[in-house]
Structures are given as C-alpha cells and as structure tokens.
Image (cartoon, helix red, strand yellow):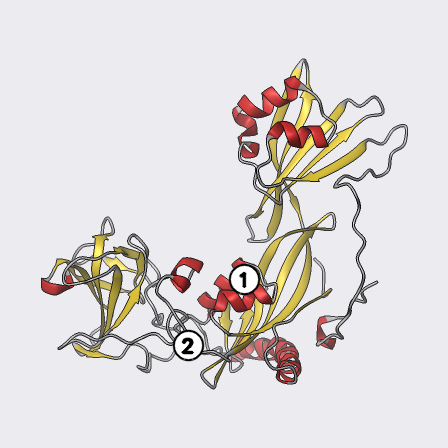
Amino acid sequence: MVQQHPAAELPPTRTIEKVMSLTSDEYQVGATSSAPYISETRIRRGDTLAAVLQRLHLDNDALQAFLTHDPSARSIYKLYPGRSVQAATDADGKLVWLRYIHTPGNDSEGQVVTRFLEVRPQGDGYAAREMTEDTDRQVRVAMGTITSSLFAATDAAGIPDSVTLQMADILGSKIDFLRNLRQGDQFRVVYETRSHDGRYAGAGRVLALQFENQGKLYNAVWFSQDGGATGSYYDFDGTSLRGAFLRTALKFSRISSTFGMRMHPIHKTWTGHKGVDYAAPIGTPIHSTSDGVVEFAGVQNGYGNVVIVQHDNKYSTLYAHQSRIAPGIRKGVRVTQGEVIGYVGQTGWATGPHLHYEFRINDKPVDPLSVDLPVAQKLEGKSAVAFAKEAAVYKSQLNMLAQFQQSMPGTALASAADASAN
C-alpha cells in the first residue's frame, strides 16, 4: 500500500511495489438482487463498437444500431484508445445504462468536470444524453530536468500536456520556451488533478511553479484576490507575471517545440535587421506579443506578408513572412496580447516556413531574446498581505522539492499527494 502524505511534507520517499493485474479488463461491483452489475472496458487501438459491446456482454443489435446511427450518441462514434465504457445490467442481463466516459470539461466557474454519454432504454428503443458530474480535487507535485525539450522532461515526470502548456504560458513573458531552454534547466511544479469515482478525470490549474533557466530562477504562484475562479500569476514578490510583452509570438506546443527547434538553435539575423526567426509549420498561428494598434498590414519588400504593431510611443513589433494575415487585421485596428494576427508562411525572401519577429524601441530593432521588457504591476495593500501568506506555503514546498531534486541530479520524478479537497 502506498502511503499518502500532505503536500507540505514533500518530497516523499520512493516506494517500490509489486502490482498484480487482473486477467480481464472487466469487473463487477455490488451485485445483489436489486443492484445492477457494472462492467467496464477500455477502448483498445483498432477497436470496433461491436467488439467493445461484446466485451461488455451486450450482444444487442438494436443497441449497436442506435449507437452507430443516432445523432444524440455521436460522441461515441470515434473510439479513442484508453477511454472507458461502462455498462450496468440487471440480474436478467438487460441493459440499465451504458456510459462512454470521453473528455473532461470545465463548468461555469472553470472547475474540471467529467463528461460522459449515457444511454438508457426508453420505450421500444434507447435515448442518449450528454452529462457532466463534479470531480474531486487532488494536488500533485512534480519535478524535472531538461535534456532535450520541455515536453520530453514533463513526459518523463508524468506531467499532463495541459499542465506543460500552462507552464509555458505562465512564464511566457520571462522565458522563450522555443529557443532559450538549455540542457540542465530544472523545474518544480504544483498543480491540481481531478478524479471522478476514483478515476482520473483530467488536470486542473497550475498552483505554483519554479523554473531554473540558464542559471536564473523564476517563480510563479496562482492568486485570486476574490477567492474565486478568476486570478493571475505572480512571482514571490507579488509582481504580476502577465508582462507587458510575451517573449515569443508563437504559442508553445508539441509541434512548435519540435519543428526545427533544438536546445542550441542558430540565431539567424538579416543584414540591416535585428530579429529572431522561429521555424514552424505553415499555418501556425502568430500572436501579438502585447496590446497595441496595427500600424501596417500588407506586403513589404523582403518581409512578404507582414504586420507591424505599435504598442505605445516607444515600442513596436514586427511579424514577417506570413502565409496570410488574419481576417480583420488592418491598419488602425486595436489588438490585444495573445490575439492571432496572422499565420506562419514563406513569403518574401524566406527560404523556408518561419516567423521573423522584431522588437523595436523608438523604431530601432533590438534583440527580442535579451531586451529588458517593461515592468509589470505589483500587488499592494491587503491583497499583498493575503498573497504573501499564501505564497509562503508554496515557496516552502518548492524549496523542499529543489533540495530533493538537486540531491538526485538527472532525475525527473513525479509524486502524488492528497491535499485539500473541494
């Protein structure tokens, strides 16, 4: 049995246990004269609907026809490997309900819920409806070391992709995750997970993050001033991490992190222009790195399709070689940070698909990778006091993880621990 520890007591001890697997992927629970028999199977690669129903002992042509053709059951049309299908039957083997547990979702307050298709007998046929149920909250901590890419490190640590993407977004104004990661960089992260009936239902929000990049330490803590679903990330000093500018105009993803991106990329520059090139597939969305007004959108010499955004009287940014400019982006239009303004292409003098990005101060190009970006706002008054109290808990956890990680160089470990539940 694996012992659970409060998150504050981490890092945990390493436990090795022998796991016995059942010979069948089905189980039955609570079978009495009144309680239904519940069977479950996981969808396998190459599965057919008939094979799934057969494993659930549902040899029912009418049910299969309903699931195949009725629009209300469309979520089960595509059988994704790893997802679960449950069936409840009575003592006579008749179907009580069938559930296809497909994707986690979010409620109106941003909390993770489980989503499933439920099919029940109705009259001479069947009826299907999509349902959601609340999930239970757990807290996980994980750590990793960069060896080739961020995704490789988070995969090794068992961190879900959605958490990895949050990590890149949270520190997107501080770290260029596409070009500036280095072998040996380390991270520690505290994040929510959700479960439903003991089953993993999806990852939630990153609660705290620590990232060492090229010898510099970055910290982030989630804080909501009203205690609700809305909030933001701040460093340990209470300074907002929603910087005035993002470090890169491309959204970090598995594709962008592997398409032409390496740990030691060559920094290409054009004669007469100082910028940075990001290799990416044609059609990859380009995002404005800050709020501003479009100064130019069109074709310009070797830049090809280009958009220039003026952010105030001092700063402007340029996005070149676009395959096409996003609809509605034209001179005089106001754009917001993160808004899609175009798509990666190979227009102008480009020899391959990429984004050429320039950061200008008083119309003079400067190195986007090293320029000191404008300072963000800092919490004050009662908000600062409340944040400091909350951040101290996460700071202690992250520092303990750092000590543990540094005592085990080259490892990527993840550990689960129950924390507070909703």
Q: Position of residue 156 (x, y in %)?
A: 58, 66
Quarter of the picture holding the N terminus: bottom right
Mark seen at residue 85: none
Location of residue 92 by image quarter: top right
Is residue 380 something that shows in the picture? no
Q: Which of disc 1 and disc 2 is earlier in sequence?
A: 1
Q: Quadrant of the C terminus?
A: bottom right
Image-based side of 334 in relation to 144, left or right: left
Q: Residue furthest left?
A: 301
Which residue type carries mark 2?
Answer: Gln
Q: Is residue 45 above or below residue 150?
A: above
- Which residue shows up at 68% across the image and 29% down it? 53
Residue neighbourhood size for the residue with mark 1, other residues' Cα within 10 Å, grouped as few (<14), some (14–19), many (≥20): many
Which numbered mark, 2 or 1, is in the foreground of this view?
A: 1
Question: What residue would you read off at disc 1?
Answer: 163
Residue 64 can be seen, yes or no = yes
Give x and y (percent) for residue 61. Answer: 65, 18
Position of 400 relative to 254 (above/below): below
Residue 64: horizontal and vertical position, in percent?
62, 23
Give the amino acid at mark 1: Val
**Residue labelled with disc 2:** 377
- Label 1 sits on a secondary structure element that is helix
Judged left or right of residue 22, residue 365 is: left
